[in-house]
Each structure stands twice: as structure tokens, then as C-alpha cells.
Image (tube, rainbow, N blue to C red):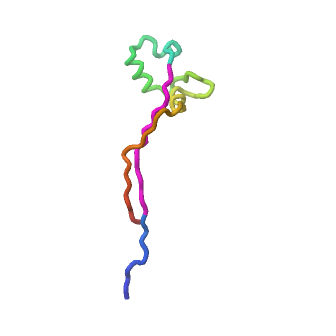
């Protein structure tokens, strides 16, 4: 008597990296006293480390500078490193 399996489950998985570029926001340094006296490089470092805690430029619709940046319009997106693989359960 044959014990061969009559069914086999198969599926495909996909992976990829999505790169999204959002529109820029101009920051008036005078509105951010914490940036006072910093060089441009120091301001960039500070913003990168503290954007979630910084006030937004438009406080009516964003809670933080980070939230405002994340809500900006997408100006470009690109999918890279696409890969697929057949797998069995």
C-alpha cells in the first residue's frame, strides 16, 4: 500500500524595502530657543535626536516636529531589494 502524500501546501513570500522621501519643512530657528547659539551642524544633530519632543511649526495639526515631518507630502518613493521565495508548510 502506497503512503505517498497526495497534497502539498505551497506558498510564496515576498520582501522588499520601501524608500519614502517626504516634502521638507522650513524651520525658523528663532522659534526654537533650544537651537540658539548652535552651529548648523549642531542644530542638525539636535533635531535628529529630539524631533519627537520638539514643537511643530504648525501646532494646529501636529503634536511634534517629528509628527509634522511624517505627515508631509510624499515627493518620491522607491521599492528596492525585491525578493521572493517559494516555501512549503
Any magenta on residue 78?
Answer: no
**Residue 26: x %, y % from top left:** 50, 20
Q: Residue furthest right?
A: 60
Residue sitting nearer the eye, 58 or 22: 22
Taking the image as shown, residue 35 lies to the left or right of residue 41, namely right
Residue visible at 39% across and 65% down in the picture: 88
For the image, the number of numbered tags is 0
**Residue 60: x %, y % from top left:** 63, 25
Residue sitting nearer the eye, 77 or 36: 77
Residue visible at 42% across and 78% down in the picture: 6
Image quarter where the C terminus lies is bottom left
Residue range of the region highlighted in magenta in the rendering: 11-26
**Residue 9: x %, y % from top left:** 43, 68
Q: Main secondary structure of the magenta part?
A: strand
Taking the image as shown, residue 72 lies to the left or right of residue 15, namely right
- Does 82 appear above or below 55? below
Residue visible at 42% across and 11% down in the picture: 37
Image quarter where the N terminus lies is bottom left
Residue sitting nearer the eye, 23 or 62: 23
- Does 89 appear above or below 1? above
- Does 74 appear above or below 55? below
The quarter holding residue 11 reads bottom left
Q: Residue furthest bottom?
A: 1
The quarter holding residue 39 reads top left
**Residue 43: x %, y % from top left:** 42, 18
Amino acid at each position: 500500500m502506497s503512503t505517498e502524500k497526495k497534497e502539498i501546501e505551497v506558498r510564496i513570500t515576498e520582501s522588499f524595502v520601501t524608500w519614502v522621501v517626504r516634502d521638507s519643512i522650513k524651520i525658523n530657528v528663532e522659534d526654537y530657543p533650544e537651537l540658539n547659539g548652535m552651529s548648523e551642524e549642531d542644530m542638525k544633530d539636535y533635531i535628529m535626536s529630539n524631533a519627537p519632543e520638539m514643537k511643530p511649526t504648525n501646532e494646529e495639526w501636529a503634536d511634534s516636529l517629528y509628527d509634522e515631518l511624517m505627515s508631509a507630502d510624499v515627493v518620491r518613493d522607491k521599492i528596492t531589494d525585491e525578493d521572493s521565495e517559494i516555501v512549503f508548510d
